[in-house]
Image (cartoon, grey):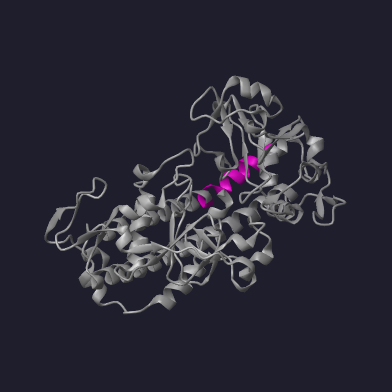
Amino acid sequence: MIADIKPYPEYKESGLPWLGKVPGHWDLMPNRGLVRRRKVLVGKRHTEYQLLSLTKQGIIVRDISTGKGKFSSDMGTSQEVRSGDLVFCFFDVPETPRTVGLSRFGGMITGAYTVLESTGRGNSRYFELYYQVMDDRKLLSPLYSGLRHTIPVDRFLGIRTPLPPPSEQAAIGRFLDWASIRLDRAIQAKRKVIALLNEQKQAIIHRAVTRGLDPTVALKPSGIPWLGDIPEHWDAPRVKQCARKISKGTTPSTEGREILESGPVRFLKAENISAGCITDKPLCFIDEETNWMIRRSQLAENDVLFVIAGATLGKTAVVPLEVLPANTNQAVAFIRPNSRVIPRFLELWLQSSRIKELIWLNAVQSAQPNLSMADLGNFVIPIPPCNEQQQILLFVAAITMPISETISRLTREIDLLREYRTRLVADVVTGKLDVREAAKGLPDDSSTEIVEDLVSLVDETETDNEELI
């Protein structure tokens, strides 16, 4: 069905530089004709409302009882949201994970957001989709003002939005909901395969780093209940006994310094540590004076990085020479191994399934999970002689390489599906593709299925906008 979609037969200039041409029968209308601001503070009635959150997946209901995430100390300043209202985040727009969401729930949301209700002249789902595209393409930048890149509400209400006929707006929303659910299901299926492959990989690693490669080796009690027996000739020291230094990073702002877009010293964050590697996204730097001021967290080649706070708690990587000089922030610790352990072997042990369980068991659950430096240093690591460590590393690399390659391929496929979905939504809501015929064969109202699937397919690693307020 998607492959058969064609462009419209006739186009005209929209007069909007970021939009270009639109179908000839579409109108353009100022937003104040389509939506109006609605601000109703819940006040003392806040206990009567469920708390909502604007996320990458749209508006969701938050579970306050978990204690996860940040919450306002005064819920009375929250504002009412009704099912069908649009919620916009008009501040820090470039950094905000999602600028707009259409609420399918009644509840309350932080008063920092802008709640808009439909005037009845347009389809709210189409309006949401159009501004999601604007958000994804960062086309709202001409509207920013001030240091916090804020969009004044009056300015937003004054700009024009393309407006297909009402039946066509509904058809566009229905088609894109149908397509998105099917693409999300394909993504979810690939995620499940990746999860199974990671379990298989973890089992291989755990066996190798706790029992070695010789199945006939004599064993002895490790003295650690969860570790059990280990090869007789292995030691079982704590991580701190295998390190010349264990430290965590520092935030430059605590020293009155800034993070730069370019500079002589790489500044690594938790986001830079992924799949055992150091990535370039985000690419941040500090100057040499700042590096000297926070010198206790200056990195060296073969330091083992370990994320101690946030959603990626427990991620690891070994520092290669090419990223130096480098420093790191407070969410990342580093271990500088001594001669007892090869850095890659230490990292491999920290990746093992049992250590991952211990990390989350010991982490303090507050606004974000946080592991103390003491707990990190007290983890027990079974270590063989260095020559055997090297043999284990070579074995694990060889046996897990096909698994890692399959995971990488599936991850690339997921990225391509996401890119395709983003492009499809953009082409449909801006009139590059005509879905009127395709939408005719779809159910008139599949909203229940859509909501249920959206809830089940939410990527829990996505950031709530509230984390940025």
Q: Position of residue 162 (x, y in %)?
A: 25, 58
Query: Residue 139: x, y in percent?
Result: 34, 46
Q: In which quarter of the view is residue 259 placed?
A: top right
Residue 397 is one of the magenta-drawn residues: yes
The picture quadrant where one finds residue 466 is bottom right
Q: Measured along the vertical axis of the image, is residue 289 above or below residue 335?
A: above
Magenta highlight range: 390-403
Q: Is residue 94 above or below residue 35?
A: above
Q: Is residue 179 left or right of residue 62?
A: left
Q: Position of residue 153 (x, y in %)?
A: 40, 53
Most prominent secondary structure in the magenta stretch?
helix
Asked whether residue 391 appears in the rendered view, the answer is no
Left or right: residue 399 versus residue 206 is: left
Q: In the image as oriented, which residue stretches furthest toward the left?
A: 10
Counting from the top left corner in percent of width and height, residue 67 is at: 68, 60
Nearest to the observer: residue 78 or residue 241: 78
Q: Quadrant of the N terminus?
A: bottom left
Horizontal side, residue 391 vs residue 425: left or right? right
Q: Name which residue lies at 63% across and 32% down.
A: 253
State which quadrant residue 268 falls in: top right
| Residue beneath the point at 50% across and 69% down | 455
The answer to which of 301 and 178 lies nearer the viewer is 178
Q: Nearer the viewer, residue 371 or 26?
A: 26
